[in-house]
Image (tube, helix red, strand yellow):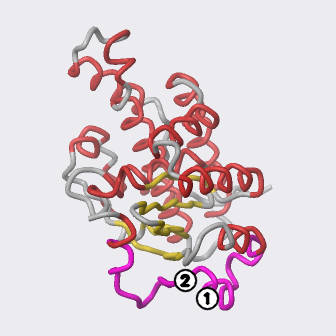
Amino acid sequence: MAVFEFLSNKAQGYFFNGLLADFLDNDKQFEQYHSFLAEIDGMAEDVRVCADLPVRINHRTISNQIIRYKDSFKLPEGYLRVPLIIYWKREELERAIVLLTTTYIEAKGCYYCMTEPDSAFSECRNDMIAMCLQDSSLADIKKAFAEMNGGTRAVGAIQRYYDHRYLGNVDDMKEKCIELSRQVFDEASARAVETEDRTPIIYDAILRAFLIKKALYVHYMMSKELLSTRHEGDVKKQRQFAKAYTDEIPIVSLSALWRLEKTEE
């Protein structure tokens, strides 16, 4: 099933799913991006948005089994949610842009969760890309939308362009993932000791670390160039290296975050 048809059939309820114009009339959470989203709405007919969509983390898939990030198993069902998915249809084209508000790396991790085998969007993966909704990336999102709507460039090629722009090569990506995960847990630790109910802070940190690990592992495994040049066509070697790369990403365990105590000055 193509992405527009799939998303159009998602039941409305605790998240918004309808015309982008209607969303802008009622939304308060993304007010700073309303003028930008209004521009997107004017670039194609009947642009729609699905907001706050829950995504299931499938722990039975190969990549999750290899990542073995057991703390992610403790997250409540549906804790991973996509803030916005912009989707539209033009003639035979059905397209979508998955938007997270944290980082491009985490947006890629979310995309991989959504589109892996046996997941909800597995049949739609060639119709959609992932981007990060931040002021610095608005021009890129607009350009990607225009190219996808024009149908003159393959969706995969568009995503690869932004992968190169935001991630660099896989070794550059690994260093960015290490630094990002360290930053996530440093910030979570500082906030947790100052907060009475630290559960949301801890869960958010665990989820973000999982998405970072997911992004790096799958991105490494999807590289045909690495398979041929670094691993001599041996998928087993590639998988071992991908796991080793993922293991380098630093984490703070859920239990350690719970035990943190404020240090007196």
Above-or-below relation of 182 to 191: above
Residue 77 visible in image:
no
Image quadrant in which you'd find residue 242: top left
- Determine which residue is flagged by label 1: 22
Query: Is residue 121 on the magenta stretch?
Result: no
- Expressed as whole percent of the image width and height from the top left, the position of residue 44 reads 60, 69
Label drawn at residue 152: none
- Expressed as whole percent of the image width and height from the top left, the position of residue 94 reads 42, 63
Q: Amino acid at mark 1?
A: Asp
Label 2: element kind:
strand
Q: Amino acid at mark 2?
A: Leu
Residue 116 visible in image:
yes
Q: Residue at x 65, y 59 (%)?
A: 133
Label 1: element kind:
helix
Q: Residues within 10 Å of mark 2 (few under 14, many from 20)?
A: some
Above-or-below relation of 127 to 14: above
Q: Quadrant of the C terminus?
A: bottom right
Tag 1–tag 2 contact (CB < 8 Å): yes
Q: Residue at x 45, y 49 (%)?
A: 109
- Expressed as whole percent of the image width and height from the top left, the position of residue 107 reads 52, 52
Label drawn at residue 19: 2
- Towards the viewer: 230 or 176: 230
- Towards the viewer: 204 or 104: 104
Q: Residues within 10 Å of mark 1 (few under 14, many from 20)?
A: few
Span shown in magenta: 6-34
Q: Residue at x 38, y 79 (%)?
A: 8
Q: Residue at x 56, y 74 (%)?
A: 47
Q: Is residue 5 left or right of residue 29?
A: left
Q: CA distance from mark 1 to mark 2?
A: 5 Å
